[in-house]
Amino acid sequence: MAANPASPEAAPTRRKAGRHRGEGQWAAGHFTPLNGNEQFKKDDDGLNVRTRIETIYARTGFDSIDPNDLRGRMRWWGLYTQRRPGIDGGRTAVLSPEELEDEYFMLRVRIDGGRLDVAQLKAIAEVSQTYARGTADITDRQNVQLHWVRIEDVPAIWEKLEAVGLSTTEACGDVPRVIIGSPVAGVAADEIVDGTPAVEEITRRFIGSKEFSNLPRKFKTAISGSPLQDVVHEINDVSFVGVHHPEHGPGFDLWVGGGLSTNPRLAVRLGAWVPLEDVADVWAGVVGIFRDHGYRRLRNRARLKFLVADWGPERFRQVLEDEYLHRKLADGPAPGQPRELWRDHIGVHPQKDGRFYVGFAPRVGRVDGSLLEKVADLAASHGSDRLRTTTEQKMLILDVAPEQVESLVAGLESLDLRVNASPFRRGTMACTGIEFCKLAIVETKGRGASLIDELERRLPDFDQPVSINLNGCPNACARIQVADIGLKGQLVTDDDGNQVEGYQVHLGGALGLDPGFGRKVRGLKVTADELPDYVERVLRRFRAERTDGERFAQ
Ligand code: SF4
């Protein structure tokens, strides 16, 4: 790798910044912090806050926390302050962070590859029930988020999680976030290549390392060798997508520069084929480019997608090969189209070893500690020690013997975890929303759950894959731009002229077969109360007017 500084202080041969106004790229010599986030990262590495949490803050309490730790570095350990209860969405934009935040934290547990064993799920369940008022949400990046966490309890939580091999290290912050992996890696009968060793190597070598603990912004990774392309590779900063190379065999196609938020972009292919054993080094090269060349002046231009858009794939690949890997990558083919629209693995499916995996759907990822404990017990009593989370806020139990499947399915269904799930259970996701998120304008989780119930009641025969994603604000945590029906939370005016919670509608977004962003339907905003009626009308019209084989997203 090129001699690139892991931190501004560590740059022995720093280049002098040119006289021109740069965008804060370290590789161009711009080491002077250009905004508050860059300043606190320069002042102290985010990873260092752990010692202060353990030795000071957990003893002296919330009020003793340095503001730059509280609203900055604590993210490096998966901790965000949560929203103070009772503050309505209309005040989100006018209150300061101090006024919006509560003294309790959201804690994100990273689950690389979505891989859990029974002991790990039980540990999460225990932490949830002991320290988080029973809360637990499965996120669309395979993590689990807990709420109502007190700073005093954080060291004990870490001890419990780390005893079973889980961590919150770099679960948030300007760092490599959780490494998303195919939930059926290593077991699916149709797998092209098992990406698990790459997920494990990246996590072992680089997560928690100061080599990449100060990036311009967050960095998202996806790795899947499944022909279903089940890791939303189109919207990650770097993705490795399983392909068969005609000469070299199975490996990965390299994509960079995807991301949603307020300036969504789909990732682009670099046309390079990467064998499994090289994935971690290539990944480190891409992250190194981001660290050194990524834009640090403006937070809203600091994601890798802006650099990729400016450079283009050819230059990006050339810099990666010449300056970071010091060798050429093989050209490779594009992945084929996924053969199915659903990529969530819900239902009962054969594994390559003759056993089965069982995918099940809670509503919008919302579970709780006691439910997770029951799921862990069910898995264990049916001979399984492996579970997975998915990028659709769902879960899987692996390694189920044929004679155990029926009993396991009955057990999950009795917990209202649907294996035989409606399209609405499968396809609806919701972000955290106003219940806990300081940026939220509207409620999402409860509304998403009740929307599922309403649609199941009103459209019991609807049989098409459909994605309905709810966000609580203009950010994109629940991927509204790539949903069939994307609902962006905002205040809207009802028939009586009152400002009430509602959603701007986006229609026709998709990933997979024909990826693209949904169209913002100009002027089409629905109040929260109108939402079930509106979605029902859209779905009925689609069903009435569709041509043979037409997908909702077409
Ligand atoms: Fe919060 Fe907005 Fe993200 Fe929802 S989309 S979790 S409201 S920042």
Image (cartoon, rainbow, N blue to C red):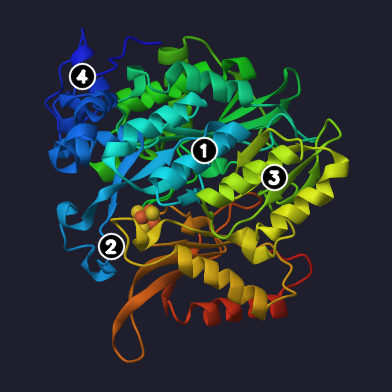
Dividing the picture into quadrants, the one containing residue 543 is: bottom right
Q: Are marks 2 and 1 in contact (CB under 8 Å)?
A: no
Q: Is residue 499 left or right of residue 243?
A: left
Secondary structure of residue under mark 4: helix
Give the residue type at disc 2: Pro
Mark positioned earlier in the residue sequence (1 or 4): 4
Q: CA distance from mark 4 to mark 2?
A: 39 Å
Q: What residue sits right under mark 2 in the picture?
A: 85
Q: Quadrant of ligand 1?
A: bottom left
Camera-side residue: 355 or 302? 355
Give the residue type at disc 1: Val
Q: CA distance from mark 3 to mark 4?
A: 50 Å
Q: What residue sits right under mark 4 in the picture?
A: 8
Secondary structure of residue under mark 3: helix
Name the residue located 22 percent from the left edge and 25 percent from the top edge.
Answer: 55
Q: What residue sits right under mark 1 in the picture?
A: 268
Q: At which x and y percent is residue 119?
A: 59, 32
Q: What residue sits right under mark 3 in the picture?
A: 378
Q: Are marks 3 and 4 in contact (CB under 8 Å)?
A: no
Dot 3: within a 10 Å radius of its alpha carbon, few (fewer than 14), some, or many (20 or more) residues? some
Dot 1: within a 10 Å radius of its alpha carbon, few (fewer than 14), some, or many (20 or more) residues? many
Q: Nearer the viewer, mark 4 or mark 2?
A: 2
Q: Is mark 3 within 8 Å of ligand 1?
A: no
Name the residue located 70 percent from the left edge and 51 percent from the top edge.
Answer: 346
Mark positioned earlier in the residue sequence (3 or 2): 2
Number of disc labels: 4
Secondary structure of residue under mark 2: loop
Q: Is residue 138 above or below residue 185?
A: below
